[in-house]
Image: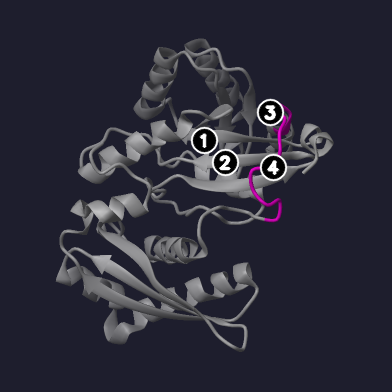
């Protein structure tokens, strides 16, 4: 790339932080224009820092979608919160997302604002889910949050409806530093396809299973085989901590897993634009939450 081309292009990193279920993953997916990060109604679903890449005119905007910041209780929780703050370090823009449809400012968001003040960083505010909030509630929340912290900008969006996304993307593009593109402009994420397949299956499990079970499972892509006819065979293993959980996932005669697998396969085919053969297994591994290698594969710190 010539010096003249480098001057014309811009590229930088944007950290998305916020309380669990503030809509960070939905916001990033709306920005990128395609699903990159796991999106479910359940909280704490993004386990590691997934980078989505959005292009706007001559700017490349690289999103670091961090796990939701909350009060940690288990080793996995501590590692996720540590990763969230690490994801915010060294980025060009920090965006705090807040669910403005909440009746009041939640404790997690208040704690994040206190932490931002301690760090002395510049951050902007994204009030998400404006379609679910009354106008007067929206104005009061905007004033309250800006009194607590001097946000550089405040955006009002509905990531789900994609309202306000273009305005935020244009502003972020302006904020990106000059320099060459850091990724191929055609790429949507630097998340390997194998991991993307596992993330998609995990999302479908979250959507179809209830209570605590989804947080006590992990999904791994065991193999990715390219076929001569252009299709791909993906073998995925779902690890659970208890024998009883295995039965819940399989369902009667394996029907639950079959239904979930078909949903994941259809979405993978749309994303990859090719036929997908998805083979799923369920295995019991009682200590997976304390497996150091697994944390490394998620880009999480085991000792956080």
Quarter holding the C terminus is: top left
Please name the residue that numbered disc 1 is placed on.
16
Please name the residue that numbered disc 4 is placed on.
181
The x, y position of residue 221, in whole percent, is 40, 69
Please name the residue that numbered disc 2 is placed on.
63
Asked if the residue at tag 4 contacts the one at tag 1, i.e. Cβ–Cβ closer than 8 Å, the answer is: no
Q: Residue at x 79, y 32 (%)?
A: 7
| Magenta region, residue range | 173-186
Magenta stretch: dominant SS? Answer: loop
Residue 231 visible: yes
Q: Badge 1: how crowded within 10 Å, few (<14), some, or many (20+)?
A: many
Label 3 or label 2, whichever comes before in sequence order = 2
Residue 268 image-quadrant placement: bottom right
Label 1 or label 3, whichever comes before in sequence order = 1
Asked if the residue at tag 2 contacts the one at tag 1, i.e. Cβ–Cβ closer than 8 Å, the answer is: yes
Helix, strand or loop at mark 1? strand
Reply yes or no: does residue 174 show up in magenta: yes
Reply yes or no: does residue 71 show up in magenta: no
Above/below status of 50 relative to 285? above
Alpha carbon distance from label 3 to label 2? 14 Å
Q: Badge 3: how crowded within 10 Å, few (<14), some, or many (20+)?
A: some
> Is residue 184 rendered to the left or right of residue 57?
left
Alpha carbon distance from label 1 to label 2? 7 Å
């Amino acid at each position: 790339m010539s010096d003249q081309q480098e001057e014309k292009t811009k590229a930088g990193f944007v950290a998305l932080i916020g309380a669990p279920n503030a809509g960070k993953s939905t916001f990033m997916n709306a920005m990128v224009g395609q699903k990159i990060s796991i999106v479910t109604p359940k909280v704490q679903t993004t386990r590691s820092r997934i980078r989505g890449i959005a292009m706007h005119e001559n700017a490349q905007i690289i999103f670091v979608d961090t796990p939701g910041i909350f009060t940690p209780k288990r080793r996995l929780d501590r590692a996720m919160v540590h990763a969230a703050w690490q994801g915010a370090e060294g980025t060009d823009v920090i965006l705090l997302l807040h669910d403005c449809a909440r009746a009041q400012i939640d404790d997690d968001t208040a704690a994040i604002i206190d932490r931002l003040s301690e760090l002395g960083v510049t951050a902007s505010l994204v009030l998400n889910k404006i379609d679910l909030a009354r106008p007067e509630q929206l104005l009061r929340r905007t004033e309250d949050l800006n009194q607590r912290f001097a946000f550089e900008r405040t955006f009002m969006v509905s990531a789900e409806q994609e309202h306000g996304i273009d305005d935020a993307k244009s502003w972020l593009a302006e904020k990106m530093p000059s320099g060459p593109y850091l990724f191929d402009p055609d790429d949507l994420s630097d998340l390997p396809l194998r991991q993307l397949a596992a993330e998609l299956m995990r999302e479908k499990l979250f959507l179809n299973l209830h209570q605590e079970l989804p947080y006590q499972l992990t999904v791994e892509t065991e193999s990715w085989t390219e076929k001569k006819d252009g299709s791909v065979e993906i073998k995925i293993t779902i690890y659970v901590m208890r024998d009883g959980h295995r039965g819940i996932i399989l369902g009667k005669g394996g029907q639950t897993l079959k239904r979930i697998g078909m949903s994941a396969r259809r979405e993978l085919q749309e994303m990859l634009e090719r036929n997908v053969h998805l083979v799923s297994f369920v295995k019991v591994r009682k200590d997976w939450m304390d497996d150091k290698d697994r944390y490394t594969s998620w880009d999480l710190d085991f000792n956080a």
